[in-house]
Amino acid sequence: MPAAAEPSESLPASPPLPAQQYQREYLRIEKLLDSAEQQLQFGRLEAARALAHNALKLPGLVEYDRYWFRAADIINEANRRIMNEGAPSSEKRRYNVRPGDNLSKIAAALYTSVSALKRLNGLKGENPLIQPGQVLSYIQGAWSIKVSKHEYILSLYNDGELYRYYRIGIGKEDRTPAGIFLINSRIRHPAWTPPGKNIPYGAPENVLGTHWLGLVPVEGTDPTLRGYGIHGTWEPDSIGTASSSGCVRLRNEDIEELFDFVPEPGGVAPPLRVEIIE
């Protein structure tokens, strides 16, 4: 007769199944986003975007999934108001205008642009008058851009955190190159210069829309590439499609806003980095 088996020790409980873990993470994400949307409804913009940023950092959230877009929409709306409606925020700084100042001089010193100063302070006209002692708001951002060709999304980051995102169009037949680029030019009302032509702004054949941000490749792509950029479009229905000659295009109202927050290339601010991914 075989000996009786020794009683086995109780084993530790199995860890939760991945599906259970993800379910818990999704519940945490939804709770954060519910709270963020409520804060946004109450006009508490910084509280809303802080909660949305916390949701983006949770391990169950995947970039460009439905939770990402829900969080990004909250951040987008909060920062749209901050950028365009004079709403207060922690990243806004104050500058006291001094004798001899002008907007170009101030923008260069503060790593920003004249158009951003005008947008943030409600200044109208080409050369708005400023006075010594006047207080101007500005954002000294550490801006960078990421473009997802697959998702048709351009994301603007400030110091590594999502700040705004925009829907885009890209090049047909995979003509938009992936890689790392720097913005090397910034032009309002650009002419379009395809090979052998110079089509002025306002001409029906000019496809560039209202603004142009020129790109120069620095890593991960053909270093000889030229003529690529981020620009507007007169064909808003082309957003979300692959129909350009290779550039990244935004709606005119979106490129105008993005353009304003890009510092003038060649100044004291470091050039803005653009990453284009598949």
Image (cartoon, helix red, strand yellow):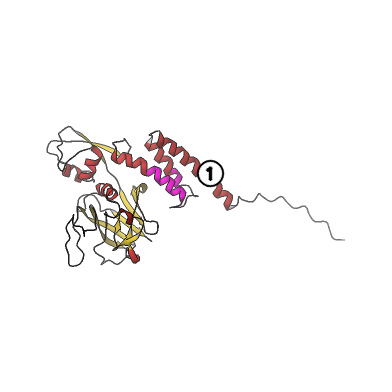
User: Magenta stretch containing residue 73, yes or no?
Assistant: yes
The foreground one among 30 and 125 is 125
Image height check: is 221 above or below 28? below
For mark 1, does the 10 Å Cα neighbourhood hold few (<14), some (14 to 19), or many (20 or more) residues? few
- Asked whether the viewer can see residue 220, the reply is no
Q: Residue drawn at (27%, 38%), measured in percent from left and top?
A: 93
The foreground one among 113 and 259 is 259
- Quadrant containing the N terminus in the rendered view: bottom right
Percent from the top left, x then y, of residue 119? 24, 41
Q: Secondary structure at mark 1?
A: helix
Asked if residue 194 lies left or right of residue 244, the reply is left
Asked if residue 212 lies left or right of residue 174, the reply is left
The foreground one among 59 and 235 is 235
Q: Residue drawn at (46%, 48%), measured in percent from left and top?
A: 67
- Asked whether the viewer can see residue 82, the reply is yes
The foreground one among 20 and 100 is 20
**Total marks placed:** 1
Magenta residues span 54-75
- Quadrant containing the C terminus in the rendered view: bottom left
Residue furthest top in the image: 133
Q: Residue drawn at (35%, 59%), measured in percent from left and top?
A: 241
Question: What residue would you read off at disc 1?
Answer: 27
Amino acid type of the residue that numbered disc 1 sits on in the rendered structure: Leu
Percent from the top left, x then y, of residue 201? 18, 55
Asked if residue 207 lies left or right of residue 41, the reply is left
Residue furthest left in the image: 100
Percent from the top left, x then y, of residue 171? 32, 62
Percent from the top left, x then y, of residue 196? 17, 67
User: Magenta stretch containing residue 244, yes or no?
Assistant: no
